[in-house]
Amino acid sequence: MSLFPPFSKSSTLKAAIKHVAEARNSEGGKADQLYKSAYQGFAKVVAGDAVLADALHNWGFAQLHHAKNKGKDEAIGLYEDAVNKFTFCLLASPNHLGGAIDGGFAYMELARLNNAQPEDPLYDKAIEFFEKAGHIQKGSAAYNLACIHALRDDHEACRAALELAKECGSLPDEQDVMNDPDMAPVKDAQWFHEFLGSVAVKLAEAAENDRRTRRGLKKVDEVKLDLPPRPTDSTLRRHYDTMIAAEIDRQREALKAKQEREAEEKAKKKKGDKFDYYK
């Protein structure tokens, strides 16, 4: 449900349409200002609709899967449509993590299908989506960014992104990283093998201490995920797992904050219920 009252939305929409009409009859800076004001109004009208955002995300996510089974031309069309869905998803819900991650993934697939060079603007668009995801949830798309940095032969940026992914728990399994074709340009670097060695040690320690690894994410009480089924495609599955891990972390934090608030309220109530005999 939108948090923006219907009446307010209607009046905002009318005002935005009026600004467009005025802008068409204006010139220069005045026209630009009117257009910008109209854009802000349109954005306010669609913002805050969580149901719409989820519908758009799942629609685009379905198109990502559909494209995998199609020829080049049809797949490109599906990926482009998916990008539009994820873009509008973020317009309706600017902090929608799935829309941000999958939007970047769709652009990467478009780049691959078009045999784009690493410096192609399609990869720049993917970076924009992944960086947006990083602002929503720290490190959630760090591995995706590492892939693009690797393709661009930027070892320093790739290493930094991989370290962030490891720190935030969004790094794929060691074998998946090693076999990822995006990592081919950095695969022979000494730092890359040292990094994978540190990952292996960390995973071994985690398993020994019975901690959850990315392969063994368990359901947590009171944490409910309303997400599409896990993909069978290994590439899509990698991005899906990143989204799952980030969403679980987000909901855990929200649950922790809720429990702390309830504990504080309970303590205040208990203190207020005490009778002061010395008044």
Image (spheres, helix red, strand yellow):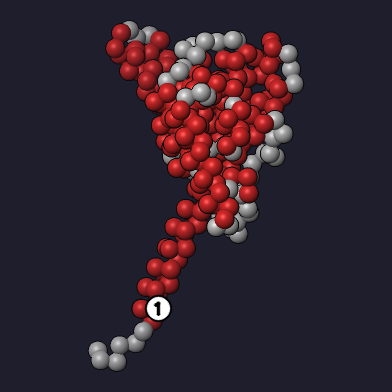
Q: Is mark 1 on a helix, strand or loop?
A: helix
Answer left or right for 31 relative to 95: left
Query: Crowdedness of circle 1 by 10 Å Cα count: few (<14), some, many (20+)?
Result: few
Is 117 above or below relative to 190? above
Query: Which residue bears the numbered disc 1?
Result: 270
Is 132 above or below relative to 223? above
Rendered image quadrant of residue 31: top left
- Asked whether the viewer can see residue 15, the reply is no
Rendered image quadrant of residue 39: top left
Q: What residue sits 60% from the left and 10% below the top?
A: 114
Q: What residue sits 39% from the left and 68% below the top?
A: 264
Foreground of the two, 241 or 136: 241
The mark tally for this picture is 1
Amino acid at dot 1: Lys
- Asked whether the viewer can see residue 216, the reply is yes
Q: What residue sits 53% from the left and 52% below the top?
A: 205
Q: Give residue 167's position: percent from left, percent from top.
A: 45, 42
Foreground of the two, 93 or 20: 93
Q: Give residue 52's position: percent from left, percent from top.
A: 59, 35
